[in-house]
Amino acid sequence: MNESVQFTVPATEEALAYLEKIVDAMELLYGISREAAIGKINQAYVEANERAARARRDAAAGRDTEDAKAISRVDVLGGSGSLDLTSDLSVALLTHELPEFWARLIYSGERSREPMRRRSPD
């Protein structure tokens, strides 16, 4: 395993192990390298935190956006102000979906819960 590319999301050992399963699913589904899959996960983390920050500003300003409503729900559940995978709740939210779900969502935005099919060889 190449250790040059690592996850940047703060995470527990359990969450990191699950992120590795998501990487495996991305490799199988899309034929991308481990490094590219980790890069996509890291980028998704950055983008999610940026959306969360905008949503918090919208909520504080009284703007009634869908993101602001979603962040309010997360805050009620004990959100920390940033998105990470260090709380029991965040790890439970991650692991309640199959790695293939997250792989599809992170790679292409697809929210499919269909079973994984291997990518056909080129």
Image (spheres, rainbow, N blue to C red):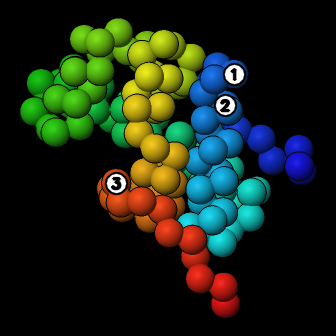
Lateral position of residue 42 relative to residue 74, left or right: right
What whole-number distance in Å separates the C-alpha atoms at marks 2 and 3? 22 Å
Depicted 121 relative to depicted 118: above or below: below
Rendered view: 46 above or below 34: above
Residue that label 3 marks? 113
SS state under label 1: helix
Residue at screen point 65% across, 51% down = 23
* Residue 122 x/y as whole percent: 67, 90
Q: What residue type is labelled 3?
A: Arg
Q: How crowded is mark 2: few (under 14 residues within 10 Å), some or many (20 or more)?
A: some
- Name the element at disc 2: helix
Is residue 101 among what the camera can see? yes
The answer to whether the residue labelled 1 contacts the one labelled 2, judged by CB atoms less than 8 Å apart, is yes
Q: How many marks?
A: 3
Q: Mark 3 or 1, which is nearer the eye?
A: 3
| Nearest to viewer (mark 2 / mark 3) | 3
Residue corresponding to mark 2? 16
Asked if residue 7 lies left or right of residue 96, the reply is right
Q: Is residue 106 visible?
A: no
Residue designated by label 1: 13
Q: Looking at the picture, does residue 80 appear above or below residue 9?
A: above
Identify which amino acid the numbered label 1 is placed on. Answer: Glu
